[in-house]
Image (cartoon, rainbow, N blue to C red):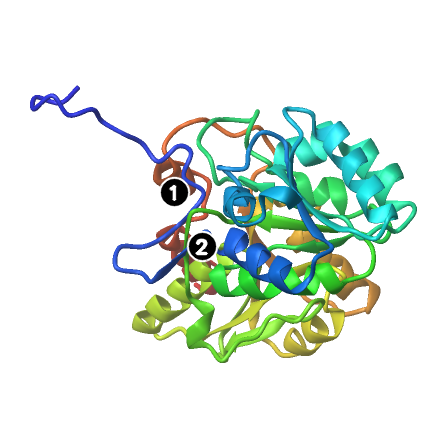
Amino acid sequence: MTTTGRRLTTSAMIASFVDEGQKTTSAPFGHALSRLAEQRPEVVGLSADLAKYTDMHIFREAHPDRFFQMGMAEQAMLGAAAGMAEVGLVPFASTYSVFATRRAYDFLCLDIAEPGLNVNVVGGLPGLTTGYGPSHQATEDLAILRGMPGLTIVDPCDSVDIEQAVPALADAPGPTYLRLLRGSVATVLDEYDYRFELGKAAELRTGRDVLMISTGLMTMRALTAAAELENDHVDVAVLHVPTIKPLDREAILRETAGDRLVVTLENHTVVGGLAESVASCLAFAGAGVRIVPIGLPDEFLAAGALPTLHDRYGLSVPEIKKRVLAELS
């Protein structure tokens, strides 16, 4: 307690990364899914007792007859979603990323991916978006899922990405996995003449000296770092990669063709995520390009307040700038 009797709070469970004064949108996933359901009666929502924490409660309130509370049973939820998809429904099933990937992998693989069903799995708290430690930090979800045949994987940057991705995922054949940012989500990409396109990367900034290839919330960080690096006379381009699978190999090969420093940024372990996706893309094409990976280490992370953890593990803007300047020196 403080001397005034006010309880100290931390940002341990906050899954939104909003700078002071930054524009936000409330629960973009929940509202986008509700709007989609008004147009498409086959859309249904499921939750593993986490509707409030994955913004599925917005859909539940708007379409109570099309919402299914499955309890703390992710395997059963994905099995039920598979059955719904078999009869022509389009399910969106939400839980925390750790439970969707670690706990329910076999059901996602054999009940959904193998028959190619249009089930959309929505994973909250991806990567280091909670301070509650390894039981809730899905630092390896991309590595777990990238090898699953036929699965589309999307890591959105902000509310714009999420709102536009929801109908695109519903239209996509086969299963999808969305890394969810929930609550008050930053709205950034509306300033960049951007439109989400499944399987496509987007150049948000041009630059002579450095190319940042980023995904998820790290695109927000990349854009801020790029703007601040102008003060150090460093010209930085930013290529946003919202779709991890299928990867936009053509854009990556095109943008890395010059002699710029190439840096990847991801809210995920450096093992098996964006950095290795980019590296394999370049290697398979015979492009001898060195990349600098900015991401989480290959270890179980500490618990604590998120700003402290992001500084510690190199995801904050000051740490990104420090790493880039060190590589250029």
Residue under pointer 1: 311
Q: Position of residue 239 (x, y in %)?
A: 57, 70
Q: Please report the residue visible at 63 percent of the width from the left and 43 percent of the height from the top.
A: 65
Secondary element type, mark 2 = helix
**Nearer the N terminus, badge 2 or badge 1?**
1
Per the model, the C-alpha gap separating discs 2 and 1 is 12 Å
In the displayed structure, 162 sits above or below 311; it is: below
Left or right: where does residue 224 sit relative to residue 177? left
Secondary element type, mark 1 = helix
Identity of the amino acid at label 1?
A: Asp
Identity of the amino acid at label 2?
A: Arg
Left or right: where does residue 254 sit relative to residue 114? left
- Report crowding for label 1: few under 14, some 14 to 19, many 20 or more residues within 10 A (C-alpha): some
Q: Residue at the far front: name it.
A: 65
In the displayed structure, 198 sits above or below 156; it is: below
Q: Residue at the far left: name it.
A: 4
Say whether residue 242 is visible: no
In this rendered view, identify the residue nearer to me: 113 or 50: 50
Say whether residue 324 is visible: yes
- Quarter of the rendering containing residue 261: bottom right
Q: Which quadrant of the rendered structure holds the C terminus?
A: bottom left
In the displayed structure, 242 sits above or below 196; it is: above
Q: Position of residue 320 (x, y in %)?
A: 43, 55
